[in-house]
Amino acid sequence: MTARITAVAALFLVAVAASAVTASNTVPKTSLDQVNQGLNKLVAFKPPECAALTGQFISSPGPYTGGNGSDLIRGTAAAQTLNGQNGNDCLVGGAGADTLTGGAGTDVCIGNAGATFKQCETTVIRP
């Protein structure tokens, strides 16, 4: 009888221990919603001339080259080369003397008076 009570008590302790381990085993939070929030913030900076644009959004320290889809490519304050390649792209230069090349597709290029515009169907010069 004592062996039976000891066995039941041992099983009970194993069950309690397993339950405690399972309860403390949590899945860490992913950064997916942070990525989506970052993209949403970038979309908020999309110029009105590019309102119809959907596609990938590139805004990082180079290279500033789009893909085959429609891209929003934003430069920084330094002088850079932005290439849209294929698709209907929106290239937005920064304060530097940028070179904006739209490529194939219907492209909107926005830059300052010191920018060089190539293969852009729409050119917008901003101060």
Image (cartoon, grey):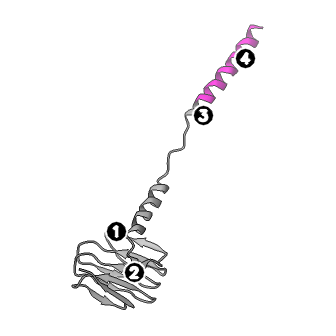
Residue located farthest toward the front when viewing the structure as drawn: 48
Q: Which residue is mark 3?
A: 22
* Residue 4 % position (x, y): 76, 13
- Which numbered disc, 2 or 1, marks the residue that appears first in the sequence? 2
* 12 lies left or right of 62: right
Q: In the rendered view, would you say 59 is above or below 127?
A: above
Q: Which residue is mark 1?
A: 60
Q: What's the distance in space between the residues labelled 2 and 4, CA to CA?
A: 74 Å
- Which numbered disc, 2 or 4, marks the residue that appears first in the sequence? 4
* 8 lies left or right of 67: right
| Residue located at (44% from left, 64% from top) | 40
Circle 3: element type:
helix
Task: Name the disc covering residue 8, or none.
Answer: 4
Q: Amino acid at mark 3?
A: Thr
| Residue located at (42% from left, 61% from top) | 38
- The N terminus is located in which quarter? top right
